[in-house]
Image (tube, rainbow, N blue to C red):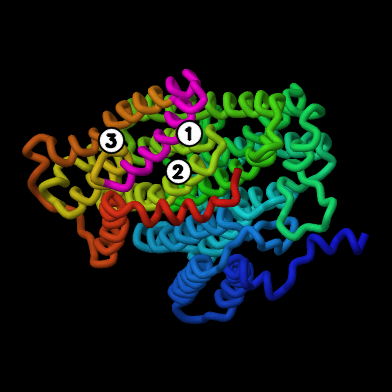
Amino acid sequence: MLLGAEAFIPDVSALFSHFGAEVVLALGIPLLLVADLFTRRNKESVTGALSLVLLTVALVLGLWQDSSSSVGLTSLLRADGLAKGFRVIALASGVITAVAALRGGDAVRHRTEFFVLLMGAVLGACLTAAANEMAMLYLAIETLSIAGYLLAGFKRRDPQGSEAALKYIIFGAISSGMMLYGLTLLYGFGGTSLLTTPPGAPEGTVSLQSYLQENASALAMKPAFIAAVVLVFAGLAYKIAAAPFHFWCPDVYQGAPTSVAGFLAVAGKGAGLAAFIRIVQAVTGGAGDHITDLLARHNDVIRTVLIGMSIATMTIGNVAALRQRNAKRILAYSAIAHAGYILMGLTVTSRAGATAMLFYMGVYVFMTFGAFFMVALVEREKGSCDLSAFEGLGFRAPFFAVSFAIVLISLTGLPPTGGFWAKVFLFEGVFSYGGAHSSSLYLWFGVIGLLNGVISLVYYARFLKAMYLADPEHNTGSGLELGLADKSMVFAMTLPQLVLGVMFAGLYETAQLLVVDLF
């Protein structure tokens, strides 16, 4: 038993070299609690500053940490490019959420508890992106989820906040059970809990991916195996708010603190997508000469399931957003639609698709946090985030309105923003795959995605209409009282979208390098 456990025990020096950010977060949580316990004066200021420092240090380490396909730190976790890419997204989301919570008033009281939960959620997201073993994947997702439940209901005196947390927990419990049952079935089929064979693993190490490669006839196209895969997909679909497990999203985003809603829309979605990629890589057998005709047909079934999920998600999100007037609910349905777009990259099960997904998430961080942060500012100043609160801001708060317009244009996927190129790479992957394989399914899939982009333009334009085309009586009066920190944050969320609209090659090449080991 001890000899068998050696594969799961990491080298301490390697642990700090490749998982330094996670170590900082894990040690920072008790440090934050101790600081809160012994600080007598200005307790909230001290813990808030310490939290920002810890999250920033973790982000710097996450950027600096090396990633390589040859790193075999432990069978439970992978220190590869995929883990690094989504780790940086989670850590950046944590830093932005912390600043947004302080500026938006979401962490005025009980600041220590808020940041402890935030750091726990970020840690869970980082571990989810690196998980290579079923039990570790499940525990990492639950770490993220449980912290998210508490953050969603952080406004305890707000009935909507309590409702948001309750709905989040109920849907989370159901999806968690489905995913756990699916993982159990996959373990039973393959006789191993490893998803892929880690580099440097002892000879004879079996993973679900390698078992499927060698025993395709025993697993591929088996209804029970497909059912197990669908159950796992269902649990992950809940994390990224994909149909048909998206029902919690609008109510939770509306009732949760706005900064938390942004965090769930970015970090939660990123972690779920990273897990999706690893699961798909495992249950399709990867790629290469070992793909037999039987396994190819099996993979076509997996792709069809993903295509159906993608179409349903983007269509439901976009159509439902047309009827909303609350800005947070509009952004919630927008987040659902964007989950459908990102899944388009996964349906082609290739490096090009994974590159497009990672590039999209890199731009999505700024698009989504920018939108939620600006909505939070309006909610703070106007006491409402209804569309009527945005009326006349184009004349009364021109800097804010122009910045918000840029964010909305990027979310729509129009030039000259990074959101345009994010969608171009996704659709290019879909149409290229359809052309290379003479697949009319993928061609129609791409057309449906384009039509959904047109639908999204309608509800994003409603914000522009409110800000610039409202009745003249709304164009006078006081604007938004934004401090230097608020304006700096708005600028920091807006500028990268314009920069990436012109100089996108660097981010795309980085994404290519990070996913070189996949498929």
Label annotation for residue 460:
3
Distance from the alpha carbon under mark 1 to that under mark 3: 22 Å
Residue 27, quarter of picture: bottom right
Question: From this viewpoint, is residue 137 visible?
Answer: yes
In this picture, which residue range is highlighted in magenta? 417-445
416 with respect to 448 (left or right) = left
Say what secondary structure mark 3 lies in.
helix
**Magenta span dominant secondary structure:** helix
Q: Is residue 425 magenta?
A: yes
Query: Is residue 341 positioned above or below 47 on the image?
Result: above
Cβ–Cβ below 8 Å for labels 1 and 2? yes
The circle drawn on residue 344 is: 1
Of pointers 3 and 2, the one earlier in the residue sequence: 2
Mark with earlier residue (1, 2):
1
Dot 2: few (<14), some (14–19), or many (≥20) neighbours within 10 Å?
A: many
Q: Is residue 249 above or below residue 138?
A: above
| Residue shown at the point (56%, 67%) measured from the top left | 66
Residue type, numbered disc 2: Ala
Observer able to see residue 261: no
As measured in the structure, the alpha-carbon distance from the residue carrying label 3 to the one carrying label 2 is 23 Å
Quarter placement of the C terminus: top right
In depth, the one of 148 and 43 nearer the eye is 148
* Residue in the picture at 27% in, 29% down: 458
User: In the displayed structure, does residue 157 sit left or right of residue 386?
Assistant: right
Q: Work out how far the residue at label 1 is from the one at label 2, CA to CA, in angstroms.
A: 9 Å
Please tell me whether mark 3 or mark 2 is closer to you in this view.
2
Front residue (pair 44, 448): 448
Which numbered tag is attached to residue 317?
A: none
